[in-house]
């Protein structure tokens, strides 16, 4: 099992980088999806439980919406969320690529999101209630934004063996929510999301697959967590 999850994380990371490399002015979003699939399948992934989710800034808040035929233009921001599948185990991650100069405040938002992700990983220690893991993320976000009005329904969820239409490993999403009382166990694997949406200083999305160990969470997906800029 662990070998499958780690291999899925390697394939996810590679396919994400292939998709980002395909983004440039004049390219259609369909070509970005094709680059992701070519890398996934070409390197040995099975069919993923969910198609890569690719959308532009104007559809950023429409979760689980994926690509349509749309040409990349200067100033675009392109959201990509996807996962490989090995033995039906998945390892999803999310990144956003900026075509040209990112909006003002993106560096600050990226730092908040990255710190939030790190806080969740540090809190994923066996015996910790899931609600406390969420609280660790929320504290970082509150401090970074300078207020406590931003909330998410969760900052991640368990993943496992997955078949379409979901990679969560079962019929229900078992989330890291503010009111969750179940406890983390060593060996659990999570898709951890540290997203800032519709907030100042800027939108920023970041997610990775994280394995809970006795010493805290271990990040398995490896794509850069800095703002990703595509040169025009």
Image (cartoon, grey):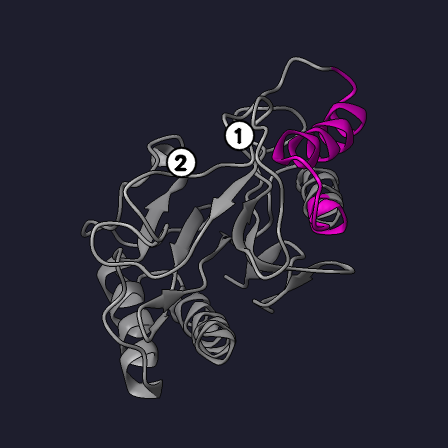
Residue 50's disc is none
42 within the magenta span: no
Given residues 140 and 17, the one toward you in this image is 140
Magenta region, mostly helix, strand or loop? helix
Which quadrant of the structure image shows residue 145? top right
Given residues 109 and 193, the one toward you in this image is 193
133 within the magenta span: yes
**Left/right of residue 89 with respect to residue 71 in the rendered view:** right
Residue 60's disc is 2
Given residues 231 and 207, the one toward you in this image is 207
Q: Secondary structure at mark 2?
A: loop
Mark 1, residue position? 197
Figure quadrant of the N terminus: bottom left
Residue at horizontal 38%, vertical 39%?
Answer: 173
Residue at horizontal 77%, vertical 28%?
Answer: 139
Q: Is residue 123 above or below residue 180?
A: below
Residues in magenta, as a range: 120-147
| Residue 191 visible | yes
Query: Label 1: few (<14), some or many (≥20) within 10 Å?
Result: some
Circle count: 2
The percent position of residue 84, horizontal first and vertical second, equals 36, 69
């Amino acid at each position: 099992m662990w070998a499958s999850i780690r291999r899925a994380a390697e394939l996810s990371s590679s396919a994400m980088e292939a998709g980002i490399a395909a983004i440039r002015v004049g390219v259609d979003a369909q070509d970005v999806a094709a680059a992701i699939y070519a890398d996934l399948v070409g390197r040995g992934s099975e069919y993923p439980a969910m198609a890569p989710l690719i959308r532009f800034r104007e559809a950023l808040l429409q979760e689980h919406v994926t690509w349509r035929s749309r040409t990349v233009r200067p100033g675009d921001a392109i959201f990509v969320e996807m996962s490989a599948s090995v033995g039906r185990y998945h390892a999803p991650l999310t990144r956003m690529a900026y075509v040209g100069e990112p909006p003002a405040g993106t560096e600050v938002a990226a730092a908040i999101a990255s710190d939030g992700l790190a806080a969740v990983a540090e809190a994923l220690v066996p015996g910790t209630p899931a609600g406390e893991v969420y609280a660790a993320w929320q504290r970082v976000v509150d401090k970074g934004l300078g207020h406590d009005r931003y909330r998410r329904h969760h900052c991640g969820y368990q993943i496992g063996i997955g078949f379409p239409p979901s990679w969560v490993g079962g019929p229900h999403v078992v989330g890291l929510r503010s009111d969750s009382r179940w406890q983390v166990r060593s060996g659990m694997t999570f898709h951890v999301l540290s997203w800032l949406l519709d907030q100042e200083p800027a939108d920023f999305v970041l997610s990775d697959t994280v394995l809970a160990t006795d010493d805290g969470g271990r990040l398995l997906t490896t794509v850069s967590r800095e703002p990703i800029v595509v040169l025009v």
